[in-house]
Amino acid sequence: MNDLKSPRGIDRTPREIGLLQRQRDSEEEAFTRPLEWSLITRLISYTKPIAFKRNLLIALTLVRAIQLPLLAWMVGSIIAGPIAQFDTDLLFWSVAGYLLLAFSTDFLFHFRQRFAQEIGETVVKTLRSEIFEAVQRQPMAFFQRVKLGSIIGRMTSDVQTLRTAIQDVFFVSIVQVGILVFAASLMAYTDLVMFAIVAALAPILWAINRHFRSRLSQSSRQTQESFSRVTANLAESVNGIRITQGFARESRNADLFRALIVDHARFNMMLARTSALLIPLLELNSQFFIALLLFVGGWRTLDGAMEIADLIRFFFLANLCFGPIQTLGSQFNQALIAMAGAERVFKLIDQEPDWTDAPSAQALPAKDASGIEVEFRDVTFSYVAGKPVLHDINFKAEAGQSIALVGHTGSGKSSILNLVSKFYLPDKGQIKLDGQDLLNLTSDSIHDQMGIVTQQNFLFSGTVLDNIRMPRPEASEAEVQKILLELDCDDLVEDLSHGLHTDVGERGASLSLGQRQLVCFARAMLANPRLLILDEATSAIDSLTEAKLQTALERLLLGRTSFIVAHRLSTIRKADLVLVLDKGRIVERGTHDKLLQAGGPYATLCQNFSS
């Protein structure tokens, strides 16, 4: 671990060494994978929508594979024929024929490039759509165990690798194999002895090229991964600059970043040394084979076994033949990389959700101006098997009641909200909505009748109006204005540069915390939900703004079943039922006043609450 030492010679803490090691080991997936027919056929199946262009492109590549050796044959024939014979007329027509063939070759190459791009884009478009749909259908547990970077990697770099495989590796390989076969046929026709030498040397050249290219690709991959660690650390440092400066971590963070830079430089130097060694070796091998052919061909020509014209033609064809051998070695390596990418992409696409709605699940009936009755019966729940976070939870919320969940961090408040929302399913017990088992109700029908405001106040890119209208995209601007008036926060619009059409920026960065939270309140109210979830919903609002919202909140809660997690008495004291949780169990229940009089855990917690 010497490379994990500080550049200044200071020993790192175990945490810092672990951080660097985890960053280095973050990519655990295989870099390459052997060619697998099932993956190849599945990838090709994505070209079915444009099967005609795909088949036409294959035909064009085959024609081009014949044209290129013919061009080399014609060059050798022109030199050995009209030029050697000083035949001016024949030279003119020969060159004209050569130019005609060259023009047709380039003409076909235009369509080969164009169709290959269209096919590659079709595959990429479909794959990315399927990846997005696969991710969208996953339950919340999936996003807890799968890193965001991994999902983005499948969508970007892995899909891009498959684009390369489809539009480049596949069709380039067809052209190169065609050139190899047709050039070999012409060489065999020209001189069998010389062709036998090339046929014997070709596997050797392939093996050497394959070995060297593999080492170069591996070094290149290590360099790319080390640079990814550098950029990830840079992004994290910039995003967390407030915390860094607040805890005077600038020096330590710079030290960590410097270590990553040194690591990246080391891989860059390894790549440079490998390239400087292997590329000249590849070139030397090709020159060695050409020297051998010159010796044998010259000997045979001097011996009268071969015409000088045939020797010239043969060398033009041999030079054309060596190119595909090297290119195919590189393409083969790219194909192995694509196989690994295809496996990761299809694994994500085929990922079955941990759970789905039962086939017999029915929609939760919608009722106007009526909350949802919620009942928990002996509910036990765990995020990780064998480690319950809720134990035997029992309570009933009548339609239209507000339930406040109170307790220390980790007591199980958010877990109850997740279960009520059917983001997760209980391990044991039963949850009923309007008397029906949650398992027998469709998730969409529950979410359609639910509104949620969280502490994170997440906003999507777009305008304030777009974000408020998220539950009802068809809502008019006048309806949104009415909602803001009801919330008594219509001055929010007046304070914004372009009113409702103000762009919120990335994650709402152009709005203050309070403004973002007000947008989330308006969004929830526009949904007109029967079930309302408020998870620390007023934490980002100052006391003055919260006091202003109390009347609007009472109007929002009226007639709706609501679950409230908050640390302010002003939000809790009017709840119909307060559930006090500790270590996943309900330890007290009742109204705010009765629990205060009881002098139990709730009364103790209230001493730390701010009203």
Image (tube, grey):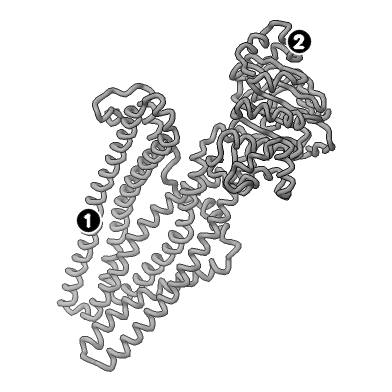
Q: Secondary structure at mark 2?
A: helix
Please name the residue shown 62% across and 17% down the image. Answer: 610
Q: Position of residue 322 (x, y in %)?
A: 30, 65
Q: Residue at x 73, y 40 (%)?
A: 483
Q: Is residue 391 visible?
A: yes
Question: What is the quadrant of the C terminus in the image?
Answer: top right
Q: Position of residue 163 (x, y in %)?
A: 48, 56
Mark 1 and mark 2 in contact? Answer it, CB < 8 Å.
no
User: What's the distance in space between the residues labelled 1 and 2, CA to CA?
Assistant: 86 Å
Between 500 and 248, the one lying in front of the other is 500
On screen, residue 294 versus residue 120, left or right, reads left
Residue wearing tag 2: 594
Residue 353 in sight here: no
**Mark 1 or mark 2, which is nearer to you?**
2
Determine crowd level at label 2: few under 14, some 14-19, many 20+ residues with C-alpha closer than 10 A: few
Q: Quadrant of residue 432?
A: top right
Q: Which residue is mark 1?
A: 280
Asked if 152 appears above or below 316 in the picture, the reply is above
Q: Amino acid at mark 2?
A: Lys
**Neighbourhood count class around disc 1 (C-alpha, 10 Å): few under 14, some 14–19, many 20 upward:** few
Residue drawn at 49 percent across, 40 percent down = 150
**Mark 1 is on which residue type?**
Pro
Residue depicted at x 32% and y 28%: 251
Seen in the picture, residue 611 relative to 65 is either above or below; the reply is above
